[in-house]
Amino acid sequence: MTDTRTWLADTRDSYDTVATSYAEIVRDLLERAPYELAALALFADLVRTGGGGPIADVGCGPGRITALLRRHGADAFGIDLSPAMIEIARRENPGVRFEVGSMTELDLPDASVGGLLAWYSLIHIPDDEVGRVLAHFHRALRPRGLLMLGFHVGDTVNLKTEGYGGHPMKVHVHLRQPEKLAAWLRDAGFVVEAQMVTTSAESRLGGTMFARRPR
Ligand SMILES: C[S@@+](CC[C@H](N)C(=O)[O-])C[C@H]1O[C@@H](n2cnc3c(N)ncnc32)[C@H](O)[C@@H]1O
């Protein structure tokens, strides 16, 4: 069993350290990721036409995707483990709801959101904790609600010891095959509706997946 407190604390401290440089580096990345940009717009649209409701951006970082979803008309808000990330998100998006929290103990009421996005954030959750996180996602989504994931495709677990301008980090990055994630999603009660793999500024090999809570 993984020691949850250690890896969560390491992940939080790492993103607190890099928050400012991370926000600068990723600010315009999506402009060089046209397929992901279109998929995120589609996500906002599918949530709206499928019954609406708020969208939770879980692992929102500095809030760039939360802001994008809002530009597409979604009632999006953000949650992140890193207080420094949340501080930047709040500063850059005045009036938008951003809260510190962990997806491992997701503090959202049952059936309270129409959409839930985890964009390159589930990548930091070890395999033996993913089921618990997906159960939270399923619980928080209303019936027919839509989940969207962004993730690095591969089979390795990489320990990142520095990043985003050479700052020290201690964070594990779990690369996963779409089939593996799809199987976990089905086990958690989701129906996988679509997936794509792209090469872009977001990821050398990036996966995007849509899955629905059926009822
Ligand atoms: C690679 S960044 C992606 C940030 C944002 N989604 C984006 O694309 O700009 C990963 C983010 O996930 C957050 N994170 C990692 N583990 C988390 C957890 N257990 N709960 C909530 N957020 C988490 C980190 O703090 C970090 O902001």
Image: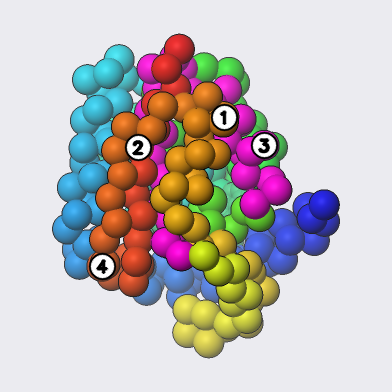
List x then y, in percent, for residue 137.
54, 31
Q: Residue 155, can we see it?
A: yes
Residue 151 among those drawn in magenta: yes
* Segment colored magenta: 127-154
Q: Which residue is mark 3?
A: 132
| Label 3, label 2: how far apart the Cα atoms are | 19 Å
Q: Secondary structure at mark 1?
A: loop
Q: Secondary structure at mark 2?
A: strand
Q: Which residue is mark 4?
A: 200
Residue at x 61% of width, y 31% of height: 136
| Label 1, label 2: how far apart the Cα atoms are | 14 Å
Disc 1 versus disc 3: nearer the observer: 1
Neighbourhood count class around disc 1 (C-alpha, 10 Å): few under 14, some 14–19, many 20 upward: many
Which comes before the other along the chain, label 2 or label 4?
4
Which comes before the other along the chain, label 4 or label 1?
1
- Please, is residue 112 above or below residue 198 in the view? above
| Label 2, label 4: how far apart the Cα atoms are | 19 Å
Residue 83's disc is none
Q: Which residue is mark 1?
A: 188
| Label 3, label 4: how far apart the Cα atoms are | 30 Å
List x then y, in percent, for residue 181.
49, 45
Residue 60 among those drawn in magenta: no
Residue at x 67% of width, y 37% of height: 132
Q: Is the CB atom of the residue marked by disc 2 within 8 angstroms of ligand 1's nearest atom?
A: no
**To which quarter of the image does residue 96 belong?**
top left
**To which quarter of the image does residue 109 belong?**
top right
Q: Which residue is mark 2?
A: 210
Which comes before the other along the chain, label 1 or label 2?
1
Which comes before the other along the chain, label 3 or label 4?
3
